[in-house]
Image: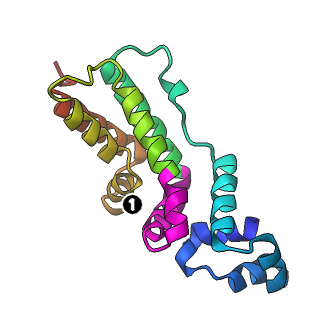
Amino acid sequence: MEAALQLHTTKGPARTSMQDIALLADVSLVTVYRHFPELKDLFRDCGERFREKYPFPGPDILEGCQSFEKRVSILIGAIYQYYAVVGDAIWLVQCDAEALPHFDAVFQRFTAHLTSLAEAALLPLSPKGKNYRRVLATIKLAIGVGTWRNLVRLQGLSSDQASELMADMVLCAAGANRDE
């Protein structure tokens, strides 16, 4: 499992073969297939192991915080700190998720968790409000690993700078301005 997880998060699942896993784990190919008879088993178990090893921030990070502006800032900051540790691995996996039918289902859990966090940050706003869908879409864009990767890895911002920029963008979409 550790060999598979290491390869999936450094090469990507689409570029990792069962033979690669066997070589890194120093076991026979038959042993790998005995543990993971189908790719969906391997992907499911790797996803579970990754979540155990690197637990994603949960809605508890927003407990006790009533201010919408603060909730947005805390949420994006926590996710970007998480991405600072494992964002590159998640990016590789996300890129491969669409190409691998069994893996896409595993990655959908991650996407659903991000959506639930975005909705939790929006609790102070009414879902029937005129900007709700726009603000939700903006938060989901802001907390996506691709956005973090673009700002931090490609544009050279720190995770804190990127987090602050994205929080400002969300607040702008909501019609709020931090400087007022």
Please state, as top left, top right, bottom left or bottom right, where the N terminus lies in the image.
bottom right
**Viewer-proximal residue among 72 and 59:** 59
**Viewer-proximal residue among 85 and 35:** 35
Q: What x and y, as percent, mark residue 55?
A: 62, 43
Q: Which residue is mark 1?
A: 153
Q: Residue at x 36, y 21 (%)?
A: 123
Q: Is residue 125 left or right of residue 89?
A: left
Q: Is residue 61 left or right of residue 176?
A: right
Q: Is residue 170 above or below residue 152?
A: above
Magenta-drawn segment: 85-108
Q: Residue at x 34, y 51 (%)?
A: 157
Q: What x and y, as percent, mark residue 163?
A: 36, 40
- Number of disc labels: 1
Q: Is residue 110 left or right of residue 155?
A: right
Please state, as top left, top right, bottom left or bottom right, where the C terminus lies in the image.
top left
Q: Quadrant of residue 120?
A: top left
Tell me which colouring the rendered structure shows: rainbow
**Viewer-proximal residue among 91 and 165:** 91
Q: Taking the image as drawn, is residue 11 in sight?
A: no
Q: Is residue 25 left or right of residue 98?
A: right
Q: Taking the image as drawn, is residue 46 in sight?
A: yes
**Viewer-proximal residue among 13 and 172:** 13
Type of the residue with mark 1:
Arg
Q: Badge 1: how crowded within 10 Å, few (<14), some, or many (20+)?
A: some
Q: SS at mark 1?
A: helix
Q: Residue at x 55, y 80 (%)?
A: 15
Please tell me whether residue 91 belongs to the stretch shown in magenta.
Answer: yes
Assign the magenta stretch its main secondary structure: helix
Please tell me whether residue 37 belongs to the stretch shown in magenta.
Answer: no
Q: What x and y, as percent, mark residue 121?
A: 38, 27
Q: Is residue 90 above or below residue 21?
A: above
